[in-house]
Image (cartoon, rainbow, N blue to C red):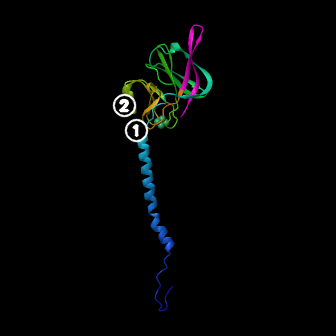
Amino acid sequence: MSDENGAPRPPEVDEDRRALATWLWRLPVVAAAGGAAFGLVQAYRIHFSKPAATPHPRFADRPVVDVGSLAAFAAPWDAVPFTLAGLPCVAIRLREPVPGGVSEGEVHLAGFSRICTHLSCIVDMTYDPETIAFAFNHRTDRPQLTCACHYSVFDPASAGRAVSGPAVRPLPRVRLRVAREAEDQRLLADGLEVEA
Ligand code: FES
């Protein structure tokens, strides 16, 4: 295109496209700022905001499971894995009673789901505090439930609270009760904690 003197005309400017182009550079900045804010919130939750297990858990009924004889819990930290309605769980003898647990004389027991509340791997008992410190970066003086996927640690003596790693929520508790059967005492499980 040229003007009446034959000189080339400057190309016409599309103001809408120019306005759009001046806004486009903001998108990656906004995305980066949003990502950073999300990361900060997650970091805060992981490091400073792991809630304690509620002192008054509510349980949903599950078909009764015979976990085993009370004799299997001869000493603190003895643990028996079992399955409750398809869910891997564990019953643990503790030194002190915890909310949601059951006591028979001096025998204090608590049951937990073994599904990690981070991304659902299976948690296991780890007994050696040095192993917990070395492998899971958490200092403690007692056995813990640990998740090898991303190194979360849950404290059975604190009713399953998440104490280290990316998991935030406590492990759901299992409702336990003791039933007498002839000469034996059986530990039964019949409910799973409903998360608040
Ligand atoms: S699934 Fe357990 S820490 Fe990630």
Indicate the secondary structure of the residue bearing disc 1.
helix
Residue indicated by mark 1: 48
Query: Mark 2: which amino acid?
Result: Phe
Among the 4 quarters of the image, the one containing residue 132? top left
Q: Is residue 183 above or below residue 122?
A: above
Q: Is residue 180 left or right of residue 78?
A: right
Q: From this viewpoint, which residue is outermost toward the right? A: 63
Indicate the secondary structure of the residue bearing disc 2.
helix
Marks 1/2: CA–CA distance: 22 Å
Q: From this viewpoint, which residue is outermost toward the bottom? A: 5
Rendering coords of residue 122 (x, y %): 51, 31
Query: Mark 1: which amino acid?
Result: Phe
Q: Is residue 172 left or right of residue 95?
A: right
- Which region of the structure is painted magenta? 174-195
Rendering coords of residue 160 (x, y %): 47, 28
Rendering coords of residue 128 (x, y %): 39, 24
Which label sits on residue 134?
Answer: 2
Q: Is residue 161 above or below residue 9?
A: above
Rendering coords of residue 37 (x, y %): 43, 50
Q: Is residue 61 above or below residue 31?
A: above
Q: From this viewpoint, which residue is outermost toward the front? A: 56
**Which residue corresponds to the image point at 55% horizontal and 24% vertical from the top-left?**
175
User: What is the crowding at mark 2: few (fewer than 14 residues within 10 Å), some, or many (at least 20)?
Assistant: few
Comes first in the chain, label 1 or label 2: 1
Q: Nearer the viewer, mark 1 or mark 2?
A: 1
